[in-house]
């Protein structure tokens, strides 16, 4: 609930103060001049308040989703599997690379998802499954 309230009501100064006084930095005595503080402010807080960075994150997410969705549609088309096996195989290879490459970002998203612990734990195995099935698919492609 706090995340939703913060997202719609906090300005930059309030978010920075909340972060400084929060449980991540305070126990370690980390203040504004510390490298850890600078990293977190630049890479965690800034994208939520800088429209350009936020739009870049959303665009990246959307483009990866479109690439994976279209690629999977191509993979499941029987005509392409039968008549254009090379297209099917190269699309599969590209999908494996995109999915495995996007896994760290997806894993980070799941770890930072705080709406429901049940959903967080239910989705926790998905990045590992992506990597496992991606590598297994790559192995099967190499054996044909």
Image (cartoon, grey):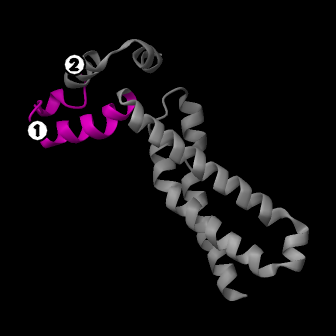
Q: Main secondary structure of the magenta part?
A: helix
Relative placement, left or right, of 59 versus 75 is: left
Image: magenta residue range: 22-48
Horizontal relation, residue 88 to residue 97: left or right = right
Would you say residue 114 sits in the magenta stretch?
no
**Disc 2/disc 1 C-alpha distance (Å):** 15 Å
Q: Is residue 131 visible?
A: no
Q: Which type of secondary structure does the marked residue at label 2 adopt?
A: helix
Q: Nearer the viewer, residue 49 or 39?
A: 49
**At 16% from the left edge and 27% from the top edge, which residue is drawn?**
26
Using the image, determine if residue 66 lies above or below residue 110: below
Q: Are marks 2 and 1 in contact (CB under 8 Å)?
A: no
Considering every residue shown, the one lying at the far bottom of the view is 144
Count the numbered circles shown.
Answer: 2
Q: Using the rendered view, name the quadrant where residue 53 is placed.
A: top left
- Point 85% across, 72% down: residue: 80
Mark carried by residue 47: none
Q: Which residue is mark 2?
A: 17
Q: Nearer the viewer, residue 24 or 106?
A: 106
Sequence-first tag of 2 and 1: 2
Secondary-structure class at tag 1: loop
Q: Is residue 81 left or right of residue 92?
A: right
Q: Which residue is mark 1?
A: 34
The local crowd at label 1, few if under 14, some if 14 to 19, many if 20 or more residues have their Cα within 10 Å, is: few
Q: Position of residue 70 (x, y in %)?
A: 73, 56
- Quarter residue 21 falls in: top left
């Amino acid at each position: 609930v706090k995340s939703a309230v913060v997202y719609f009501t906090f300005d930059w100064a309030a978010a920075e103060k909340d972060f400084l006084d929060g449980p991540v930095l305070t126990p370690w005595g980390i203040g504004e001049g510390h490298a850890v503080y600078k990293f977190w402010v630049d890479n965690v807080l800034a994208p939520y308040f800088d429209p350009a960075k936020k739009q870049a994150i959303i665009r990246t997410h959307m483009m990866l989703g479109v690439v994976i969705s279209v690629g999977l549609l191509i993979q499941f088309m029987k005509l392409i599997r039968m008549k254009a096996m090379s297209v099917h195989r190269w699309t599969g290879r590209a999908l494996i690379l995109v999915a495995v490459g996007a896994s760290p970002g997806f894993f980070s998203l799941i770890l930072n998802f705080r709406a429901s612990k049940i959903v967080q734990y239910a989705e926790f195995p998905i990045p590992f499954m992506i990597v496992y099935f991606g590598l297994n698919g790559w192995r099967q492609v190499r054996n044909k």
